[in-house]
Amino acid sequence: MTKPSLYFFACLLIFIIVLSLLITGSSILTVPIYEGSSIPMGTPITWMGLIALPLTIYFGVGEFRDLKKRHKLFNQLLKFSVGLAILWVPVSYLLAGNLSFSFSGTATGFQGGQLAMKLFWGYTYGIAILPLVFLIIHCILILIKKRGKKNI
């Protein structure tokens, strides 16, 4: 097995496990990382899933690792997407003011308030949607290219 395919399957497995835990609302997500901690396991688990998604697409589509002119932009955008995912915990901490990422309607300032919560969810969904958009655009471009070759 080549390294990219090994990385692809590892990232895919991580993503599928994290997604299934999030969809089922597993109780492991609310368990503290260690006794006495206020940081739930859901924070690092979700973080791993957000990082694994763009990496799965990056390692799963060989063209994205090719630095030819057409795919160089996808390569750079996916790397940017991984960077956004890596920054998810620090940015979310700045928005929420805690590592459990809980927001309060009674917060007086920006941090932990409703606007910060909206930004948190927008950022989180954006991290998840962005690599999927790149994959969809790539698939559409492949279909257009194949359709163009058929008509010749």
Image (cartoon, rainbow, N blue to C red):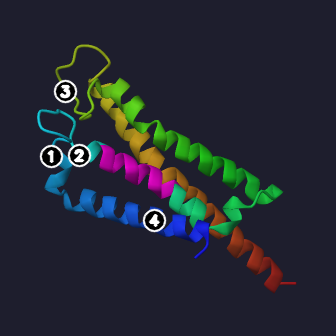
Q: In the picture provided, is 73 more to the left or to the right than 14?
A: right
Give the spatial CA distance, label 2 vs label 4: 20 Å
Residue density around tag 1, few if under 14, some if 14–19, many if 20 or more, within 10 Å: some
As drawn, 57 above or below 83? below
The part of the chain drawn in magenta is 44-54
On the image, the x and y values in percent for residue 104 come to: 19, 26
Give the spatial CA distance, label 3 vs label 2: 20 Å
Element at badge 1? loop
Q: Earlier in the sequence, mark 2 or mark 1?
A: 1
Give the spatial CA distance, label 4 vs label 1: 25 Å
The residue labelled by disc 2 is 41
The prevailing secondary structure element of the residues shown in magenta is helix
Taking the spot 54% from the left edge, 41% from the top edge, the residue there is: 83
Q: In the picture provided, is 35 more to the left or to the right than 3?
A: left
Q: Is residue 97 visible in the rendered structure shown here?
A: yes
Residue density around tag 2, few if under 14, some if 14–19, many if 20 or more, within 10 Å: some
Identified by mark 3, the residue type is Ser
The residue labelled by disc 3 is 104
The residue labelled by disc 1 is 31
**Residue most toward the left?**
36
Q: Earlier in the sequence, mark 3 or mark 2?
A: 2
Element at badge 3? loop
As drawn, 140 above or below 101? below
Dot in front, 3 or 1: 1
Taking the spot 17% from the left edge, 53% from the top edge, the residue there is: 28
Viewer-nearest residue: 124 or 62:
62
Q: Earlier in the sequence, mark 3 or mark 4?
A: 4
Give the spatial CA distance, label 2 vs label 1: 6 Å
Identified by mark 4, the residue type is Ala
Give the spatial CA distance, label 3 vs label 1: 21 Å
